[in-house]
Amino acid sequence: MLTKFEYRILRTIRKREQDGTDRHLEDMIIDKPEKFGRAYDNLLALDFIEWVGYEISKTGKGRYRLTFQGRVALAAYEGNEHAKTEKRTTGMAAPSGRYEPVPSFASYDDQN
């Protein structure tokens, strides 16, 4: 079951997919950036073109790890149509390799 914080992050991802805007990941960290600890600055440094998948997990002590995969606009390709698909992980832990498509939120709403 998703927590309210996880739901807000995923809702923001979904909205971003639907409206096609190109915003910084800062927009995903709604009201608790401290939950991401030192990874916060790394999140702000990335700008996505297209989401491929994500995974959110707790790392203990109430902190979250957001593992995501997407088509990332790299500085070397700026101004081109080229983009490189990369996996990035916030936090210290390595990605589990399990990426899931961004869901509809009926499952969250049904649980509450």
Image (cartoon, grey):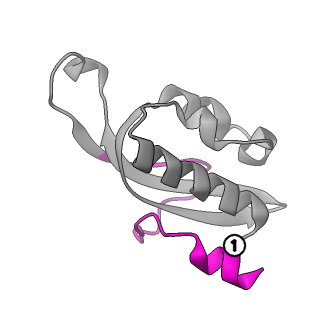
Question: Circle 1 is placed at which residue position?
Answer: 2
Residue, far bottom: 111
Quick one: which residue is furthest to the top in this view?
79
Residue for point 42% across, 31% down? 22
Residue 76 falls left or right of residue 51: left
Q: Nearer the viewer, residue 13 or 80?
A: 13
Q: Is residue 73 above or below residue 14?
A: above
Query: Element under label 1?
Result: loop
List x then y, in percent, for residue 35: 77, 48
| Residue 79 in which image quadrant | top left
Instruction: Give the amino acid at mark 1.
Output: Leu
Q: Residues within 10 Å of mark 1 (few under 14, many from 20)?
A: some
Vertical position of residue 59 compared to residue 86: above or below = below
Magenta stretch?
Answer: 86-112
Above or below, comparing residue 101 to residue 23 in the picture: below
* Residue at position x 77%, y 63% in the image: 4
On the rendered structure, is 37 left or right of 15?
Answer: right
Assign the C terminus to one quadrant of the image: bottom right
Magenta stretch mostly in which secondary structure? loop
Q: List x then y, in percent, for residue 85.
A: 26, 45
- 15 or 29, which is in the foreground? 15
Q: Is residue 49 visible?
A: yes
Q: Is residue 105 above or below residue 47?
A: below
- Looking at the picture, how far across and down is residue 31, in whole percent? 80, 41
Assess whether residue 104 is covered by the magenta stretch: yes
Q: Quadrant of the N terminus?
A: bottom right
Q: Position of residue 50 (x, y in %)?
A: 33, 44
Toward the viewer: 61 or 103? Answer: 103
Q: Residue at x 20, y 22 (%)?
A: 77
Q: Nearer the viewer, residue 110 or 102?
A: 110
